[in-house]
Every structure is written in C-alpha cells, then in structure tokens.
Amino acid sequence: MLNNKDYIYQSLVNHIYFSGTVRSFCTAIGLTFFKNNQSYIDKAIEIGYKATDIINKAISYTDKDLASEILKQEVYITKYTKEVDLLTEKLFTIDLKINVDNDIKLLENKKDINYTDDLIEKVNILNNEGLSLVSEFNNFVKDIKTKIDNGELFSYLYPDFFNYMFEEISVYGRDLERLNSKKDYTDFYINELKYYFNELLKKSAEYIRGFLDTIHQDIFDIASFYVNSFDDLTEKYLKDNNNSNLIFETEKLVDNYKKFISNNIEKVLNSEIYFITPPIVLDNFLTNVNAYLYIINNIYKKN
C-alpha cells in the first residue's frame, strides 16, 4: 500500500507529465487537419484545454521538493520548451496559450505542503479527472484512426502515430487506476514499464527518421541505430527481467538518445534541419526520455 506522500507525489508527477503529453498531442493533431475538418480541430483544442486544467491543478498541489524534482528532471518543461512553443506558434500562426515562464515561476516558488485529508481528497478528484481525460482522448484518436483507415479523413500525421498516442496515454490511465487502488509498484508492473518505455523510445526514433527531410542521411542512420538498440534491449528484458545490469545499460542508452534528440531540436531551432511535424512533437519525445530517466532513478533503482 502507498503512504499518503507517495500517493500524492506519484499522482502529481503522472498528471504533469502525461497531461502535458496530451496537450502536446492535441496541438499536433489540431495542426495536421485541413480547415474543412474544423470539428476535429475544435475537439483537439477542447481536450488540450482540459489537459491544461489538470496540469494547473497538479502544479498547485505540489510542494517545493516535488516541484524541484519536476524542474530538475525536465519531465514537463525542458530547456527547449519555450523556444519550441514559440517556433510552433510562428510557423502555424497560432497562439498555444502556454506560458512556460509562468509555470516555471510557480514551480520554483512552491513551499512545504501538509498532507491533509483535504489535499488527498483533491488528488483523488484529480485522478478521476485524469481518467476521464484519458478516456476522452483515446476515444478521439481511435475515431480519427478509424476514419483515416476507411478513407474518410485525412491528416498529415501517419496513421500509426495515432496508435502511438493511444498507447502512451493508455499507460497514463493504467497508472491512475493503480494509484486509485493505493497500490505501490510491483515487480511485474515495473517490468511492464521497462517494456513500454523501450517500445515508446523505439517508436519515437522511428518517427524521427520518418518525419525527417530525406537529405539528412546521417540523422536517419543514427535514428535507425536507436530503433535497433531499443528493440534489442526489449528482447533482453523479455529474456531476463531480473538482470540488474540491464538497468545501467538502459540508462546509458537512454541518456545517449537524449543527447541525440536534444541535438536535433537545436538544429530545428537553428533552421538547419526540417521535419514534417510541428516542432512541439520533438519536445514531447524529449520529455518521454526524461520521464524514463526519472523512472530509472526513482523506481528501478529503489526496487
């Protein structure tokens, strides 16, 4: 069973990371439809606003230690987020209504919080709001994917990218269900997380090479290396989940992949390379990496 502090901490980290991901996905979805699909654009905006509301509440419930950890680990805001948001706004002439400076200020100025019954109840309510968000978002992307498959709808995103979004946000839902049951991480659950994040990062490497301008063969080749490396790592975990040495191998691979994504973001910001996807998608890939590193250090190594 989780104690109150762990329950609150794990819940809030999930909301800030995953709801930030939902918001990023919704922005990408809204920017990849024609104007004659305005209802889908409006729905993406609506869900994105709901995700933002959950983020704002989660930030308001954090204490100074958790806020410091979230900023240090960059599971929500990376050092590129502000520039990437501004570039996305510039390229698509939209207002994302995201104030990174304000969120950083709020997190930096958090104080100690008492774990009262009132706070626990607020987190309970937020977890249920998160489950509702997961359901609404996943139903939305399933509907889009079905219509794309049936030739009824066009999006500039690959059809498989909607599967990727569905799978990532489904993890959000499963973890909220675990938290609502006040269950701590089990070995089985941790092994599932390893598999999930290896697959998630492999997929993001596939999308980096797939969204990339084909003149950049060097970046394509490096992305392919990471696709194969994460695939190999998954196979190792499937053969021996209890091999603690794999944690350090994983950490090294993920850390190197983080440098690769960061380098690509910097090149995008400097107009050196071009991807056929909104820049915010790359920043989302980076928060995925940071979340995996956070899990490695705060879950894997403590179990």
Image (tube, helix red, strand yellow):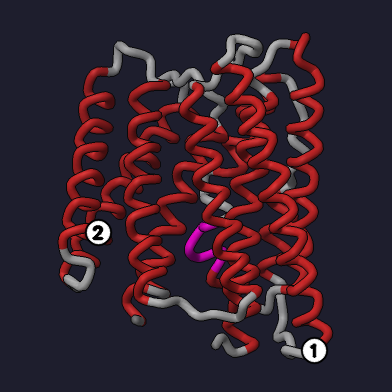
Where, quadrant-wise, is the C terminus in this rendering?
A: bottom left
Looking at the picture, how far across and down is residue 232, in whole percent? 18, 47
Q: Residue at x 71, y 66 (%)?
A: 127
Q: What secondary structure is marked by label 2? A: helix
- Residue occupying the point 64% across, 41% down: 138
**Mark 1 is on which residue type?**
Asp
Asked whether residue 86 appears in the rendered view, the answer is: no
Q: Nearer the viewer, mark 2 or mark 1?
A: 1
Q: Is residue 148 above or below residue 10?
A: above
Which residue is label 1 attached to?
A: 117
Q: Residue at x 58, y 53 (%)?
A: 77
- Res 22 → quadrant: top right
- Left or right, 13 with respect to 106, comes to left
Residue 92 seen in render: yes
> In x, y percent, where is residue 218?
22, 23
Which residue is the site of mark 2? 250
Q: Is residue 99 magenta?
A: no
For this rendering, which residue is in front, 227 or 111?
227
What residue do we see at 49% from left, 30% from top? 161
| Secondary structure, magenta segment, majority class | helix
Pointers 2 and 1 in contact (CB under 8 A)? Answer: no
| Residue 15 spot, x, y in % from top left | 65, 61
- Packing grade of label 1 (10 A; few <14, some 14-19, many >=20) is few
> 261 or 129: which is nearer to us?
129
Q: Provide the residue span drawn in magenta.
A: 70-75
Query: Where residue 224 sits: x, y (%)?
Result: 23, 31
Q: On the rendered structure, is 130 left or right of 236?
A: right
For badge 2, the amino acid type reads Thr
- Element carrying mark 1: helix
Q: What is the count of numbered marks?
A: 2
